[in-house]
Amino acid sequence: RPVVTRPETQAIDMNSRSNTLADRDIVPSDLTFGFLGLGMMGSTIVKDLIYTGHKVVVWNRTIDKCQPFVEAGAEVKDTPMDVVEAADIIFCCVSDPKGAKDLVFGNCGVLQLKDLRNKAYVEMSTVDPDTSLDIGEGIKQCNGRYLEAQIHGSRQEAAEGMLIILAGGDRTVFEECHSCFKTIAKNTFFLGNVGNACKVNLILQTIQAVSLVGLAEALALADRFSISLNDIIDIFDLTSMKSPLLLAKGKEMAKGDFNPQQPLSHMQRDLRLVLNMAENLDQSMPVTSITNEVFKHTKRLGYSEHDSSAVFVRSRF
Ligand code: NA7
């Protein structure tokens, strides 16, 4: 069993800007935007929204994380419910479906406000279609509008404003979020009904997870032969198989640098959601099931908070 050190928690750099922002010609909406969840993704997004002139009200479970945003001009509230009261459109960006549901249905949650007329709620946390439908139903029953806006991309891509937004639900909300999406994403897609965007996002995550495990196993075999991993990656770069993702992840595996761009726990969460969806459809996904086992085992070895490329460590056993 390897000795595992936790990756360092990187403080958000409030002064960094993506190079692309200046070229985007963003005219900020004059609506007030609420933001629930200031983790790595949420912080990066909010920082850029403030920079491009959006009026933002924030809340985070661990209140200390709000301080840099107060200094940057955001308003902080004590509960999710208070954010909803103060904002026109509320984004949520937390770790998992359970957290996402807690913020809507829980104590001091969004629905405690009862009347959400003239409010809209946007779910950015990665969730499964059923969770998104439940949240959307709850919001609609209180007369609010709902959009799922799944964010596809790594923390690095978020920092560069190069996410892809996959949206489904109320089209008017989608349009009202235009200046926010333009700030954080290189492409934005409206995919129709609630649930569709979650499905597309999880399908993309499946491709990524399965590819990573294949890459890790192949590099582990090279390592057993004492073939230089850097040589393999250089040759791989010349083939038609190369992709920016696999090249970047291959280099991380060769260096043993698992700085979390897409945390392993998030990737395994996505595989779990995918397999639940497939189970309900009797859809056979044997490779994804094994991929999930590889991710689960790597988690048990202590790599939850590392990057997904840490599956390489397990493959070397
Ligand atoms: P992080 O950096 O792990 O941050 C997770 C955030 O979620 C952080 O603000 C947490 O609050 C918050 N969280 C987690 N569970 C809960 C519950 N139960 N209630 C309230 N808040 C909660 O993740 P990322 O920012 O990288 O990713 C966020 C989402 O974007 C994720 O779904 C990705 O797939 C896309 P804390 O600071 O720990 O108090």
Image (cartoon, grey):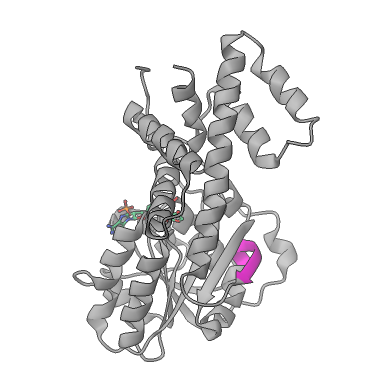
* Residue 131 coordinates in the image, percent (x, y): 35, 66
Q: Main secondary structure of the magenta part?
A: strand
User: Which residue shows up at 52% across the image and 74% down it?
Assistant: 168
Of 218 and 280, the residue lying toward us = 280
Pick the quarter of the image with the C terminus.
Answer: top left
Q: Residue at x 61, y 66 (%)?
A: 183
Q: Locate the N terminus by quadrant.
A: top left
Determine the quadrant in which ligand 1 lies.
bottom left
The image quadrant of residue 232 is top right
Tell me the quarter of the picture where residue 163 sits: bottom right
Q: Residue furthest top?
A: 226
The correct choice, above or below, for 316 with respect to 50 in the image is: above
- Tell me where the magenta segment starts and ends, as one range: 182-189
Q: Is residue 242 above or below residue 234?
A: below
Figure check: 99 above or below 133: above
- Viewer-proximal residue, 102 or 288? 288
How far across and down, in percent of the image, does residue 89 sit? 44, 79
Q: Is residue 79 visible?
A: yes
Residue 152 within the segment the image draws in magenta: no
Side of 219 relative to 125 (left or right): right
Is 105 positioned to the left or the right of 186 in the image?
Answer: left
Is residue 35 shown above or below 259?
Answer: below
Residue 265 located left or right of residue 193: left
- Picture coordinates of residue 157, whole percent (x, y): 60, 50
Which residue lies at the image location 70% right of the left edge and 54% below the top edge?
19
Residue for point 55% across, 27% down: 216
Please provide percent x and percent y for residue 208: 57, 44
